[in-house]
Amino acid sequence: MKLTGAMQVRGQIRPRKSNGALARLLGPQPRRRDTTARDGGSTLAWNIMTLPPLLLFIIMLIASQSLFIAGSFHRDLGLGRTAAAWDLANYVRVLTDSLYLQCLLTTIRVSAVATLGTLLLSFPVAYVIARMRSRWAMLLLAGIVASTFITIVVKAFGLMIIFAGNGILNRVVMGLGLASEPVKLLGTETGVVVGLMQFTLGFAVLLLYSVLQTIPRSFEEAAQAHGASRLRVFWRILLPLSLPGLSVGSLMIFNMCMGAFTSAALLGAGHVLTLPVLIQQTIMMQVKYSMAGTLAVVLLVVVLLINLVSLFLMRRLRAARTLIA
Amino acid sequence: MKHGVLRRLSMRLEAPMGRALIWSVVVIAFVFLYAPMIVVAGASFSGGAHGAIEFPPTDLTLMRYRTIPVSQYRAIWFSLELATVSAVLSVAIGVPAALGLVRGNLPGKAVIAAIFRAPIQIPAVVLGITLLQLSYTASDALNLDLAGSFTALVVAHTFIGTPYVIGTVTAILQRFDRRLEEAALSLGASPWRGFRRVTMPVIMPGLYAGALYAFMVSFSDVPIAIFLAAPDSATYPVEIFQGLEQNFDPSILASATLVIVFCFALMLVVQRLIGLETLLRTGGTGRR
């Protein structure tokens, strides 16, 4: 069952890759090998060009990652010193101490809600821009890109001003009589969610724009011409066609949220602890390098696991859909 | 019958209502994206009682701008230097990497591409502490004082900037018609001349876009610099971050506004240079 699904999916993709009919019309095509043979020397030159940067990256990755992973298996002795003996004490503590587990759950919860909110806000924006015919589309897109160029510290600062007890948000809310006393957002999970959304929204729009742009407008027009309502067009055409890109995109947004430090730290204001914030505090305040390393490993592994599981589920889902269709 | 009328009516109403709904989301999204910046910039012109932040501003004054302390200017300058050096190095490493990645025939290209993307897939905080430990270890091994140095920051920011250059240049190269260069070669140009006169002009926009992204990644980074920067050489974002967490100085409003204006201006310049479309097409997603 699983196998057939995978095979079907693979079988679907293959014909698109090699346009067989066209290739046969053009006759035998030794083109690729031909150029390689002709400028074999220059291909070698291109290969040699990649090697130094690649080597640099591998060294940097291995050196940095192995150090901290190895470090996470030692015990902290205080004052930044770590024991020489190997042990699992840090991991046992992280996986049994309710403080750390709470923190992990908070990170996942906040990230999931922020991802959902970001998707709900960014999809309509990306759709409108992707379907605009005028130069306004470029202008709106430029507005999105420009907003992503401003450091999140400044944006989080702006949000802190807006959320303050006597800030503009509370004056509006209380002025409208929606609340009798100031709404507290700073230092709450809601505040952190808004901060994370501020962090990811621009990227999400750009991401979804590139996905929605690939869906031909004619599909929607055809459906509408046959009397499908807008909601139905969204449900039956836009959503299924954008689903592969949408699901990968939402994973990317989720990953951004899981790793987000600045916005979570500033809007959490010390009351909401997510893993990245806790990692920074463990080093800066407690000076426990190996504990911070352990938390970093846990963060990496959890993010990786969530990604793998959801990619697996998506593949199963798609395979099931192709079987039904 | 009655249902038919209702249905037709609802169909007639649905299009404008749907449009109104979708456009209101667009407006909300843009307000949400820009509100924090507008509030910071607006409050920077308000004098207010000393230390109080007011938005909308009650009076218009440049007082906050006059009282920006030297330390903040120094932090901005430090960040500019750091971002420039990192962007230049990112280009120097990223362009050959992208050329080889697209044109070479190394086995396992997908894996190589993944390795080049790795620095921006790892959560920034994790990268921050790993690079901090690396700088300690390297300092011990080489008998240098790397921890908290400009060098350590440059290495770290080049590490996260290079993937963007590789991304933008790769995006351009993949659309590039190699026959142009082959034509130059067959007309008697030397390989170097063909590369310099045909390929270079084509990838230049990708190079500029990549350099801009690398610059911005460095110029806005907190989670890596907060570990690597020494107390006396903080980058500007770290300086604001610490200011917001510890001793708040309202002149941050003014310097932050200057930085916002600078970033927009820089984007405009690059946009003039390579065109908005190239800037948008070559990337811009997945930054921190």
Image (cartoon, coloured by chain):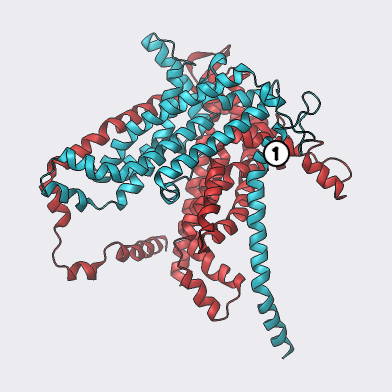
Chain colours: A red, B cyan
Closer to us: A302 or B228: B228
Does B58 sit above or below residue B179? Answer: above
**Does residue A65 show up?**
no
Q: What amino acid is labelled 1 in the image?
A: Val
Q: What residue appears at the point 50 percent right and 26 percent down from the top-left corner?
A: B128
Q: Is residue A286 left or right of residue A189?
A: left
Q: What residue appears at the point 87 percent right and 41 percent down from the top-left corner?
A: A181
Q: What residue appears at the point 57 percent right and 18 percent down from the top-left corner?
A: A288
Q: Position of residue B161 (x, y in %)?
A: 42, 33
Q: Is residue B116 left or right of residue A238?
A: left
Q: Secondary structure at mark 1?
A: helix
Closer to us: A176 or A71: A176
Hey, which quadrant is residue B92 in on the image? Answer: top left
Q: Is residue B188 left or right of residue A222?
A: left
**Does residue A90 show up?**
yes
Closer to us: B210 or A267: B210
Tally the marks: 1
**Mark 1 burial class by Cα count in 10 Å: few <14, some 14-19, many 20+:** many
Does A147 sit above or below residue B68? Answer: below
Q: Position of residue A273 (x, y in %)?
A: 66, 32
Q: What residue appears at the point 75 percent right and 33 percent down from the top-left corner?
A: B60
Does B72 sit above or below residue A115? Answer: above
Q: Give the residue pinned by disc 1.
A: B39
The extreme front residue here reads B61
Q: Position of residue B224 (x, y in %)?
A: 51, 27
Instruction: Please identify the quadrant where the N terminus of chain A is shown.
Output: bottom left
